[in-house]
Amino acid sequence: AQKVTQAQTEISVVEKEDVTLDCVYETRDTTYYLFWYKQPPSGELVFLIRRNSFDEQNEISGRYSWNFQKSTSSFNFTITASQVVDSAVYFCALRGHTNAGKSTFGDGTTLTVKP
Amino acid sequence: DVKVTQSSRYLVKRTGEKVFLECVQDMDHENMFWYRQDPGLGLRLIYFSYDVKMKEKGDIPEGYSVSREKKERFSLILESASTNQTSMYLCASSLPPPEHYGYTFGSGTRLTVV
């Protein structure tokens, strides 16, 4: 069974603050993939990043960074110097390696960035 | 630009009706998925298909069926719509692992059953 937990339901910050969204997962697969998606107010989910279970290197893309720690089964997402356009619901997801593997999403974290 | 297209953005149906939600992708993806999204419950997988004519139950398949006769089209069927199926329905497609670099989602169909 797979499970993804995003303990933070809602986060509110003021523009230019840094914010970290937490994601903890459970899986029995030895090979798996972790994802973050963004769902802005317009509604369409957009893929942000994929991480393989065998690659624990952290990743930075502009103001976004991701910290993958297998030892704690966590895949946290940090936005540096947040902007109003970052306001969205963010979903963490997990997928197994097999072709027929299911993906499991967390319940999402609603981030509000105030000007 | 690659796309997943859902046939309707908003739909209102009556209880007991048979409802078809259509999803078409133009990326030649093998895998296609149907999720429903409800406040406080996140995204829940209804059905998925990893190839033409193949289907697998997700976490909440009751009351639904699917059809995948062609690679690009994945249909979700509500056999007899009920009010508890009022929800946002999201279709997605992807390549299979290990080439899977995330889902491409459609813009969703907001279904109201009255």
Image (cartoon, coloured by chain):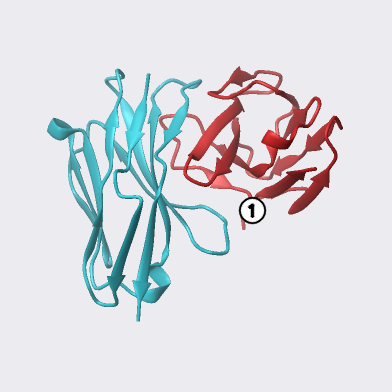
Q: Nearer the viewer, residue A10 or B89?
A: A10
Residue drawn at the location 42% of the way across and 72% of the way down: A85
Q: Nearer the viewer, residue A65 or B46?
A: B46
Residue drawn at the location 63% of the way across and 49% of the way down: B106
Q: Position of residue B42 (x, y in %)?
A: 48, 42
For label 1, the residue is B107
Lateral position of residue A75 relative to residue A3, left or right: left
Lateral position of residue A53 relative to residue A49, left or right: left
Q: Nearer the viewer, residue B15 or A110?
A: B15
Residue drawn at the location 17% of the way across and 44% of the way down: A57
Residue drawn at the location 58% of the way across and 47% of the way down: B105
Spot the residue most to the bottom.
A115
Q: Is residue B108 in sight in this rendering? A: yes
Q: Quadrant of residue A25?
A: top left
Q: Position of residue A45 (x, y in %)?
A: 52, 52
Q: Position of residue A39 (x, y in %)?
A: 49, 56
Note whether B96 is above or below A111 in the view shown. above
Q: Determine the chain carrying the residue at label 1.
A: B
Colour used to depict chain B in the structure image = red
Lateral position of residue A23 relative to residue B109, left or right: left
Count neighbours of disc 1 (C-alpha within 10 A) and say few if under 14, some if 14 to 19, many if 20 or more.
many
Question: Is disc 1 placed on a helix, strand or loop?
Answer: loop
Q: Nearer the viewer, residue B72 or B11?
A: B11
Colour used to depict chain A in the structure image = cyan
- Residue flagged by tag 1: what amino acid is it? Ser
Q: Is residue B8 in sight in this rendering? A: no
Q: Quadrant of residue A1?
A: top left
Q: Quadrant of residue A86?
A: bottom left
Note whether A47 is above or below B66 in the view shown. below
Note whether B30 is above or below A110 in the view shown. above
Q: Position of residue B63 (x, y in %)?
A: 71, 23
The quadrant of the image that shows the C terminus of chain A is bottom left
